[in-house]
Structure formats: C-alpha cells, structure tokens
C-alpha cells in the first residue's frame, strides 16, 4: 500500500501528483479524505493517520522530508 493518500479535490492536485511522481513517491488518489476545509484551502496529503498540509507544493515536500 502506498505511504501517502492524496484527495483528488485538494488544491493543485495535478501539480502535486506530478511532483510526487517526479520524486518517485508512491501515493494513492482517493475520492475524498473527509477533510474538505483543509483540502479546499491548502495542499494536503495523508500519511498513516496524520494529515499534512501546506500553502505550496514545495513547503509540503519539505514537511514530508523529501
């Protein structure tokens, strides 16, 4: 199972997916992660039971230690 889950409704989903693929990070796209207020206002991924969000893709990748 992929380490990260990405909601297809998160901000800048296409750019985020492309960035994760370029870094060879395995992720799975879900229809909804039930965190709409975060999803629609920030770039967000779910790692295990933790939601990680940021205002930009670069900042999110930094938080993921990638």
Image: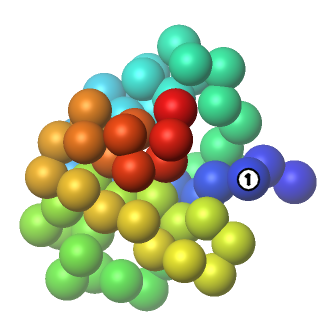
Viewer-proximal residue, 4 or 66? 66
Question: For the point 36% across and 83% down, which residue is it?
Answer: 35
Q: How many marks?
A: 1
Q: Is residue 9 visible?
A: no
Q: Where is residue 18 shown, x and y percent of the image?
A: 44, 22
Q: Is residue 30 above or below residue 13?
A: below
Q: Is residue 38 visible?
A: yes
Residue 39 falls left or right of residue 5? left
Question: For the point 49% across and 47% down, which residue is it?
Answer: 64
Q: Where is residue 12 shown, x and y percent of the image?
A: 23, 41
Q: On the image, numbered disc 1 is attached to which residue?
A: 3
Q: Quadrant of the N terminus?
A: bottom right
Q: Is residue 66 above or below residue 23?
A: below
Secondary structure under tag 1 reads loop
Q: Classify 10 Å Cα crowding around label 1: few (below 14), some (14-19), many (20 and above).
A: few
Question: For the point 56% across and 19% down, which residue is it?
Answer: 23
- Tell me where residue 43 sits by quadrant: bottom left
């Amino acid at each position: 199972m992929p380490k990260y889950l990405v909601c297809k409704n998160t901000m800048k989903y296409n750019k985020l997916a492309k960035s994760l693929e370029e870094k060879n990070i395995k992720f799975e796209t879900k229809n909804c992660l039930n965190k709409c207020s975060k999803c629609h206002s920030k770039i967000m991924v779910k790692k295990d039971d933790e939601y990680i969000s940021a205002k930009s893709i670069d900042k999110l990748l930094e938080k993921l230690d990638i």
